[in-house]
Amino acid sequence: MEAKKPLYRKNLSLVISFFILITISFVLAIVLAYNLTSKYVENEFSSNKIKVFEEVIKPYNDFFQNSVPEISYYQGYLDSASAAKYAKIVSDRYPFIEKVIFYDTEISNHPITDGFVVRNFSISPKAVYQFAAKNPEDSIVLFKNNQPNTLSLKTADEFNKMAIKFSSFIESLDTTKALSEDQIFSVFYSINPNRITYLNIPRREELGIFQDLMLKKAARSPVFEKDMFSFYLNPAKLALRNPHPELYQQIKIVPLVYELLTEEAEQFQTELALPGAFAGYKLYLSSSPKYLRQEINTRFLPIAGLLFLIYGILAALAYLIYRNLYINQQLFKLQYDFINNFSHEFKTPVSVIKVAGNNISNAAALSDKERQHYGRILDQEADKLNELMNKLLSFTQIENKSIEVKEVSINLKEFTENLIKAYHLNKPDFNINLNLSEPIPFKTDPVLLNIIFNNLMDNAYKYSEPERKVLDINIRKNDLKLILQFKDQGIGIEKADQQHIFKKFYRIESRYNQQGSVGLGLALCKELIKFMNGSIEVQSQPGKGTVFTIELPYQV
């Protein structure tokens, strides 16, 4: 039997190794998961700037692609009032437009004082207006052609650039072909830092007329109206929308040559250059390590929770394996002790019976005294075997649920006194005191109750010193419960053993168990009491004694 112990130790070592392995794996998984989460968040910090950029630049793209080309719909027929209305609409819709310059333009082959002339082709401003949110009244009109030489260089410069570009285009234009997108963008748009200038696109037949005006001498032509707008933009007024506040702590528009502040150098940062008229600026996004770490922790917590769950499951499995190994080892020990003790319990009375039988068969003649002596020995040993078999049979019946409670009404005082008298016949040195002042009628199974009483009395007698073999049986009724208390003055039970004494085959190692015990007495008591819907508790102090308290439902 002892050969099994190394195997148990080996299995226990495997369980411990498994637990250490899953712990190390868990720690590595936590570290790896946190690092991967950090890297993922940092990658998102770099990649999601595109989405922020698209949100920030969206109004500018809408203005450039939709509102600016709208000017061509009017085909040059805008006057100051309608131009002012248009300027107000776009300024209200796009706050980054600070002011709008409107060039009410004329094209002809007439001589002009202000403007640009190529051969017979002339392009000049009839009037120039400035529109802004807080524009003074006297600054709305910047120029009128009935006031020669009043066009400022700053105002004329942008007009002349567009006029030169348009005139060059007209000179080399192939009028048999439609305008391409590249031609439209390069000729009718002028994109400079913080400024977009746009000349409305003429109709195809007008382009032919303009080329004829330039290349051919002709009589005085009619005047063709054209509209040119110059939009002055402020990138600082772009609306900063942040679709990812969990990643970007700060978003701002800064110049391309922006120098980082000392505290910004330690932050996570990324940037994107703005397009078109805002090409001199960039979108700058930043977050402090602490701010970004909050997002990392937020995303890491569910992962850590899942890892903890997996670790908990594996740790629970390791514990269950250890527990099963421990229980198996305990069961092995109990079975080993049970077989030894049971064999001894059977062997002793069988040997005594055999010796008595041999003496009887070998004796030539037996006196009445000898016959009575051998008869008493055979009867006592047969009772021991019968008692042992009854315990095993009772356990089998309880486990198979084949036992039935046969309730009859008894007088509890009379029942207990009879048990004590019968017990004194075999154990005259056992002092049993019954504390029950009045008869108590009680409806129960007397056979089962008798087994409980006898087992507890046997237990008290066996584990008491010769000079302290005393048992007090206290019985009282409390409401709907009957309380039975067995108090001895024996050797007591250690606290560590008290939680195990009601287990089947459990034996306390002491000199009182040297003569054999199968560990069924208290276990059988508990099972019977439980079967009778009651409970049993133990209180004990080593060297002072033990108290068993039984509670049974009281019924008459």
Image: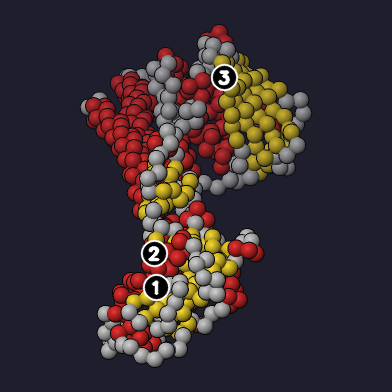
Mark 3: give few (<14), some (14-19) or many (20+) Cα within 10 Å.
Answer: many
Q: Which residue is mark 3?
A: 540
Residue located 39% across and 17% down the image: 514
- Residue 483 x, y percent position in the rendering: 68, 31
Quadrant in which residue 53 is drawn: bottom left
The CA distance from mark 3 to mark 2 is 99 Å
Quadrant in which residue 160 is drawn: bottom left
- Residue that protrudes farthest toward the top in the picture: 467
Mark 2: give few (<14), some (14-19) or many (20+) Cα within 10 Å.
Answer: some
Residue located 30% across and 34% down the image: 24
Q: Amino acid at mark 1?
A: Phe
Residue located 73% across and 33% down the image: 477
Q: Nearer the viewer, residue 330 or 208?
A: 208
Residue 191 disc label = 2
Q: Nearer the viewer, residue 452 or 508?
A: 508
Q: Nearer the viewer, mark 3 or mark 1?
A: 1
Instruction: Say above or below: 243 vs 478.
Output: below
Q: Amino acid at mark 3?
A: Ser
Residue 428 as seen in the image, left or right of residue 224: right
Residue 116 disc label = 1
The CA distance from mark 3 to mark 1 is 119 Å
Which of the marked residues, 3 or 1, is nearer the chain's N terminus?
1
The CA distance from mark 2 to mark 1 is 20 Å
- Residue that protrudes farthest toward the right in the picture: 438
Q: Nearer the viewer, mark 3 or mark 2?
A: 2
On the question of residue 147 being in view, the answer is yes
Quadrant in which residue 72 is drawn: bottom left
Colour scheme: secondary structure
The quarter of the rendered structure image containing the N terminus is top left
Which of the marked residues, 2 or 1, is nearer the chain's N terminus?
1
- Residue 191 x, y percent position in the rendering: 39, 64
The secondary structure type at the circle numbered 1 is: strand
